[in-house]
Image (cartoon, grey):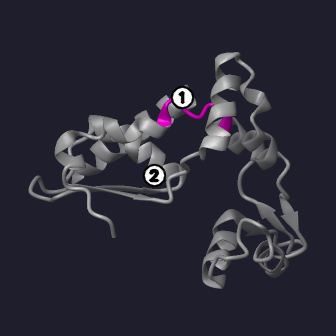
């Protein structure tokens, strides 16, 4: 249900923004990471000119197969992705410390430093009292999203209207 709710919110926001602009505007639907999946799921309900998906979280076969089994036996809470994000570090002594530590992490060690810094600045907030950097969202919420990952999401591409699919170009 989580993904349906997020997709519905995305569609409602898109349509509200569309109402506020001139009718002749050509619309581009885009999203990054979770937003890419939400845009993909919303694509079948919206009219737009282009679809841009940046780093959609497409699960690899070694993850999606066990996840599908967990989903089918109603044990989604055992998802390795969910468990991993629920255990993520939520606090650092400072934003700079978060940057230094995360740029060495397995996930981000090959990222350009600018991207790691952008991630830290967008994902953490600095407390005025002691300058500690804390995660802006609850990892349980993120874990829940992995638990509710839409079954068959990997074929979400087929939900894109054919007129859009036929015009997909790599960038």
Numbered disc 1: secondary structure:
loop
10 Å neighbourhood of mark 1: few (<14), some, or many (≥20)?
few
Please tell me which residue is depicted at 55% across the width and 25% down the height of the picture. 1
User: Is 67 a magenta residue?
Assistant: no
- Image check: 64 left or right of 106? left
Q: Is residue 5 above or below residue 110?
A: above
- Image check: 31 left or right of 79? left
Please tell me which residue is depicted at 50% across the width and 59% down the height of the picture. 55
Q: From the image, state whether disc 2 or disc 1 is nearer to you.
A: 1
Q: Quadrant of residue 101?
A: bottom right
Q: List x then y, in percent, for residue 50.
A: 24, 56
Q: Is residue 54 above or below residue 68?
A: below
User: Is 147 a magenta residue?
Assistant: yes
Please tell me which residue is depicted at 61% across the width and 77% down the height of the picture. 115
In this view, the residue in front, 29 or 151, is 151
- Image check: 72 left or right of 37? right
Label number found at residue 36:
2
Numbered disc 2: secondary structure:
helix
Please tell me which residue is depicted at 47% across the width and 45% down the height of the picture. 37
In this view, the residue in front, 29 or 94, is 29
Q: List x then y, in percent, for residue 58.
A: 54, 48
Secondary structure mostly seen in the magenta stretch: loop
Badges 2 and 1: C-beta atoms under 8 Å apart?
A: no
Q: Quadrant of residue 135?
A: bottom right
Q: Which residues are magenta?
A: 146-153
10 Å neighbourhood of mark 2: few (<14), some, or many (≥20)?
many
Q: List x then y, in percent, for residue 40.
A: 39, 44
Label number found at residue 151:
1
């Amino acid at each position: 249900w989580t993904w349906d709710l997020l997709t519905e919110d995305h569609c409602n926001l898109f349509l509200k923004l569309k109402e506020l602009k001139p009718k002749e505007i050509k619309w581009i639907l885009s999203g990054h990471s979770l937003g890419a999946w939400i845009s993909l799921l919303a694509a079948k309900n919206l009219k737009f000119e282009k679809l841009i998906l940046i780093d959609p979280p497409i699960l690899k076969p070694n993850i999606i197969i066990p996840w599908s089994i967990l989903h089918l036996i109603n044990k989604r809470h055992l998802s390795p992705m969910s468990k991993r994000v629920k255990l993520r570090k939520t606090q650092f002594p400072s934003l700079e410390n978060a940057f230094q530590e995360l740029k060495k992490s397995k996930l981000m060690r090959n990222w350009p430093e600018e991207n790691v810094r952008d991630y830290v600045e967008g994902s953490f907030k600095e407390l005025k009292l002691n300058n500690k950097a804390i995660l802006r969202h609850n990892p349980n919420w993120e874990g829940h999203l992995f638990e509710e990952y839409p079954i068959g999401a990997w074929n979400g591409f087929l939900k894109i209207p054919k007129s859009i699919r036929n015009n997909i170009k790599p960038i």
